[in-house]
Image: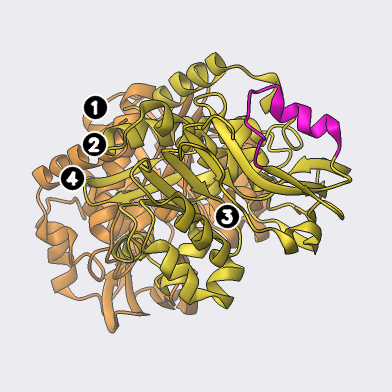
Chain colours: A orange, B yellow
Amino acid sequence: MAKPPYLIVIGTVAIDELSTPFGVRQTVFGGSASFFSYAASFFSKVGVVAVVGEDFPDEYRKVLEERGIDLTHLEVLPGKTFHWKGKYEADMNSAITLQTDLNVLLDFKPRIRYEKMPEFVFLANVDPELQLSVLDQVHGSALKFVACDTMNFWIQNKRDFVLKVLGRVHAVFMNDGEARQLTGEVNLIKASQQIHNMGPEYVIIKKGEHGALLYSHEGVFIYPAYPIDSVYDPTGAGDSFAGGVMGYLASARKVNLKIMKSAIAYGTVVASFTVEKFGLGRLREVKRQDFDKRLEVLKKICKI
Amino acid sequence: MAKPPYLIVIGTVAIDELSTPFGVRQTVFGGSASFFSYAASFFSKVGVVAVVGEDFPDEYRKVLEERGIDLTHLEVLPGKTFHWKGKYEADMNSAITLQTDLNVLLDFKPRIRYEKMPEFVFLANVDPELQLSVLDQVHGSALKFVACDTMNFWIQNKRDFVLKVLGRVHAVFMNDGEARQLTGEVNLIKASQQIHNMGPEYVIIKKGEHGALLYSHEGVFIYPAYPIDSVYDPTGAGDSFAGGVMGYLASARKVNLKIMKSAIAYGTVVASFTVEKFGLGRLREVKRQDFDKRLEVLKKICKI
């Protein structure tokens, strides 16, 4: 039995292979849970619920351990680690998936064994049935706030399960394309209203270089992305954005519109660092103060 | 000889025909100079330098006259008024041009005959050679600030002239696609830096539903669009945005980054009204105070 972190993420830990206009990397440490937890660790104690294969390098494990991330729920199964191969062309806003090898992810049945359950939970983009099984486990009096992510594949192929998840979370993170796909509504304000009606109190639409949009019954919040003139690798931007948001919320121990706005602002600056190098390269160089500094600049940039 | 307005626009006055997912209109009063001047008139005295045909309805002329817009330079030539037929499909961000009848625009040779030259000049999207001929006429000690717009057609077919115009203006308004086309640079920050290097001190990138980006040597400014859940007709959004910006600047009688930021914020809210009805329909219903009210809401929406 391990000590409970305030915040856990269930998602993927991956070995990526990717090419962008700025270079090619045969093996990059990736995965939604890796980016999320690394980003969140600047704000809060965070634990990873995920699976890797026997080939998972010690060196990658140490990257997370160095940030004090709880890995007691990082299962090692016989076989190979989840592998994603993708590329970005001139338009760095959208990745092109070349290959996905689920490997050990096929046998992943997450079991939350913390003595005391976490208060904040993030269900990264995995099969919505898996998200539901985690929701069943963390459901209880300790739980304060659950958020989820999803993707076009699940919206298209497991829509009913996606809707079940949405009915049980406090917040959802989605990109603009997914929000339009889920609702069939092009106007993002209308789309986020409709998603709000599906359950989540906070609907957070990620618009890449155009920033983020929050819809809640308390009000709307729009925040621009930090202007970056050298986007090297957008992989993990969305997950580290969510990690910054959820880490900030977990550190506040409660959620309301005011706190959520600050959380989104921090998520925005975290993601702006993520894209400046391949994988976790840039985030490994920065300190908590760097987020504060960049946020001060961003506040100025969008202030009249 | 007419009394000089502070601000003039050279552009088109048109009879449009358009369809959006919300309806079809056989004849709508349109054109860049119409939208621009109508928007600017809430902030400053403005004059229109444009041409119409003998078919131009009195009713349209009155729409502009009612706002006190100076029409002494609205030439009437034998023939038909410029006519644009377009449609918007589900994605209201981009118009599909179905037909363009230049008509009297083919014979348009603008002559600025004001006794005292205007201080602020906007060269809306017309042939860059025409823009240059106006620049030659307004050039002089009275002139404080010239801005221009352009479009993909001129960038592709008259690039050298577009560059000549850019070398002689203080500000340029462009949409994101045009900025990328002109520079061959996908990253908007880099693209706007490059355009800045072509001449204009202020580079204003219009991103439609994603707001606006300003690049200047004094700093960067990013402002979101006002969230509208019922975009009926995006025609004229960009021109009325520019009208709001330039009208505000002309009313301030000078330009610096601080004033430019407020100007862009006002342009943003003006454009948000424009899209709520066909043509000038919505702008004809609002008052100056409505802009202030909506701007207060927008400030709140993007404030942490």
Residue receiving disc 3: A177
Do marks 2 and 1 share a chain? yes
Q: What element carries label 1?
A: helix
> How many numbered marks, from 0 up?
4
Choose the circle earlier in sequence order: 2 or 1.
1
Do marks 1 and 3 share a chain? yes
Q: Nearer the viewer, mark 2 or mark 1?
A: 2
Q: Which of B67 and B210 is in front in this view?
A: B67
Look at label 1 and name its amino acid: Ala
Residue A51 seen in this snapshot: yes
Per the rendered image, the range of residues in magenta is B57-73
Residue receiving disc 2: A300
Q: Is mark 2 on a helix, strand or loop?
A: helix
Residue receiving disc 4: A294
Look at label 3 and name its amino acid: Gly
Q: How crowded is mark 1: few (under 14 residues within 10 Å), some or many (20 or more)?
A: some
Question: Where A262 sits versus A233, above or below?
Answer: above
Q: Nearer the viewer, residue B27 or A178?
A: B27
Choose the circle earlier in sequence order: 2 or 4.
4
Residue receiving disc 1: A252
Question: Where B158 sits versus A226, above or below?
Answer: below
| B157 in the magenta segment | no
